[in-house]
Amino acid sequence: MIAETGHFALILALAVAAFQTLVPLIGAERGNRQMIASAVPATLIQLILVYVAFAALIHAYLISDFSVQNVFENSHSAKPLLYKISGVWGNHEGSMLLWVFILASFGGAVAIFGDNLPPTLKARVLAVQGSIGFAFLLFIVMTSNPFARLNPVPIEGNGLNPVLQDPALAFHPPFLYAGYVGLSVAFSFAIAALIDGKVDAAWARWVRPWTLAAWMFLTIGISMGSWWAYYELGWGGWWFWDPVENASFMPWLVATALLHSAIVVEKRNALKVWTVLLSILAFSLSLLGTFLVRSGVLTSVHAFAVDPARGIFILGILCFFIGGALTLFAWRAPTLKAGGFFSPISREGGLVLNNLFLCAACASVLIGTLYPLALETITGEKISVGPPYFNLTFGPIMLPLLLLVPIGALLSWKRADLTAVLQRLWAAAALAIGLGVLVLVATQRGPWLAPFGMALGAWLIFGSLADLAHRIALFRAPLSSSLSRLVGLPRSSLGMTAAHAGLGLMIIGIIAITLWKVEHIVAMKPGERADVGNYTVQFVGETPLTGENYTGRAGQFRIFRGETEIATVVSEKREFKPMGTPTTEVGLHQTLAGDVYVVMGDRTADGARVVRMYFNPLVSLIWLGALVMFFGGALSLTDRRYRVGAPKRNLTTAGVPAE
Amino acid sequence: MTRKQKRLSVIVGGLAILGLAAGLVLYALRDTIVFFYTPSEISEKNVQPGTRLRLGGLVEKGSISKAGGTTITFIVTDTIETLNVSYTGQLPDLFREGQGVVAEGVLDASGVFMADTVLAKHDENYMPKDVADKLKEKGVWQEGKGAGP
């Protein structure tokens, strides 16, 4: 009964979404106040209905209602509670429902918190949100009903793919989707602005916090996925340039560009057309990602659907929204008044460069992702485009961008004095070069990228801090006055400093694991030792293992540094009920300096175990860097000028100093 | 600088970056892509030793040998031709006899495929799509059942 309620709520939500699309749009066109005002209640009703449907599906999973086909196929009564819930989105139908759930949440958030928006703009934004919701609800109702019943009712379910039964992966999809779908708000604002024919500083100020929130979720979602791949897949890798990873990375790149270009619109009223285009592109890439992952075009752990009807349906949605948006853009963009121009060496110029590099990088990833698909469709030839391609394209494009980040952040608006900026950065540059030289000396004839990469990371970190130190007059004024200046700084500029420094941390982590990873594969019998990096690993022995829904063997390993034992780790081989699907759990000893990563493999002919060991130096910095970037975004989001209602209030409260 | 010159400098800079990116992409696409072949195609196309490629097929029953400590040898078949594969390291959990597998590496002079990566993806009913397609072409694929038990 509850499942039927959920199904019914979905169909009602579809009808409400149709209303939410059409009525406010027509109302805004005709200036009909009542029709315009209907956007908010329609959005909220759609939100409630989608919530009811989502809650109904979660309920079915919680009580293990195997009469629902989706629950039967993806759950098992012996599964831990967390994975019963995460099982809801561990399959095609449920993950699409999660998609719509988050979309409705963002729509609702705009409806509730968008009090200060002009009513027509708000109505149009909500209408576009409604149209996206309509398309995806239609998709779910027509092709992917999560509430389909089974008769006779099976006694036990099939269980969730065991590699997905992991805490990081339980939260990875909601965060990633919050990022993907969050970009729909920027998209809706762009479409509304195109219909309106007006883009100004206020528009940018409304769009930016939504984009920032989406970007933060994407950052966390992607890094969670990478963290999961690192310790769950057992290859010691953290990024594989897998098409599915690329599908989430491309929206991130464009969202990053959008974050930066929206600042120019806000501060200088320039780059308007470009920013609108980026808003459209960012969400288009989200849709493309959804299509690639959900249509079965790619085979991977993410590709649940192999039903071609679904792929074609999503392709239809994709073509409609991207094609429609770009057509509207081509038609209406010329009506947007171009803003003022600026000197190439200026903050605006720096941000334009940032956008160019990010978009070029995104294009290189896009080509690398789609080229094999295109080639196979056209010639039937199968190829794979792997890390070598991306190292050769993405790397060199990002390198100059990263070098320019600390400089660009210090340039002033309109026209900047490059010499003055470089003078403020000499200390950071000296520190970075010093670190590079140190690495060069320490690693001797290692790859040139090692000292260069370390220096680059340090340059980003110290460059950001140098800017901060300058702003608060550190060492030039008494410490107390520096501190009070620090508190008085706009949060958005603190956020920028944090995000750029986080990027530097991430670069150091990436370069370190890429170039300095130590791998050792050896057959070991209990009691034997092997070296990896500066550590020694001893295989103690193995014991049988019983978990809630699996059995297996656990191998104990002691980790020594010199002769001192510093840790014991366990690597497990598990076999999951009900299919006996095997998985491997990695034994991981983590420190900031690096991880010792131990994987117990198969038995050899003479009864030893193949053990694969890694020493991954500084690898935690990758995820730590992502966290710092997320934190920077959050800090910026709390800036008073983005606070809800702020744009309006700023008009009345004079004396808020401009940056 | 006049307004026109400013605009020109931005446009020229933009084009330079795009040109650089396009050049890199074209160069990389020529040099870094890896072709995907089945054992029959490798013998048909007379692949030169040392060329990096991906090999797809099924692991032949009874062919897995772990005699050499951490080095494993097995035979990949597309039911028409077979190829010996040698791999040092740890096999994925789902690597099994009779199941689909994708190996990446180079063919050595004696005709043994020296793999440095072996993939058997995340699901036990999973057949790498590339393999399934190739097997369909060869007519050894049964829809719904996959190949093998």
Image: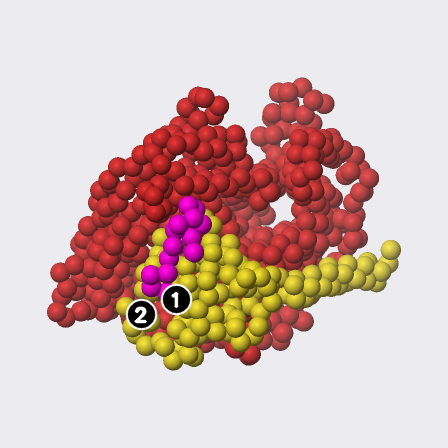
Chain colours: A red, B yellow
Q: Is residue A284 visible?
A: no
Which chain is mark 1 on? Answer: B
Verify whether residue A83 appears in magenta.
no
* Residue that appears at 46% across and 30% down: A536
Please tell me if label 1 and label 2 are on a single chain: yes
Q: Which residues are magenta?
A: B60-73
Q: CA distance from mark 1 to mark 2?
A: 9 Å
Question: Which residue corresponds to mark 1?
Answer: B58
SS under mark 1: strand
Please, what is the three-letter code of the amino acid marked with disc 1? Leu
Q: Quadrant of the C terminus of chain A?
A: top right
Which chain is mark 2 on? Answer: B
Verify whether residue B68 appears in magenta.
yes
Q: Position of residue A273 (x, y in %)?
A: 65, 64
Q: Position of residue B69 (x, y in %)?
A: 42, 45
Question: Which circle marks residue B148 in the picture?
Answer: 2
* Residue that appears at 28% across and 68% down: B149
Q: Dividing the picture into quarters, in which one does residue A474 lie?
A: top right
Q: Residues within 10 Å of mark 2 (few under 14, many from 20)?
A: few
Q: Quadrant of the N terminus of chain A?
A: bottom left
Q: Position of residue A35 (x, y in %)?
A: 42, 70
Q: Is residue A69 visible?
A: yes
**Nearer-the-camera pick, A84 or A412:** A84
Q: Position of residue A113 (x, y in %)?
A: 44, 52
Farthest residue in the right direction? B1
Earlier-in-chain disc, 1 versus 2:
1
Q: Residues within 10 Å of mark 1 (few under 14, many from 20)?
A: many
SS under mark 2: loop
> How many numbered marks does the figure carry?
2
Question: Badges 1 and 2: C-beta atoms under 8 Å apart?
Answer: yes
Please, what is the three-letter code of the amino acid marked with disc 2? Gly
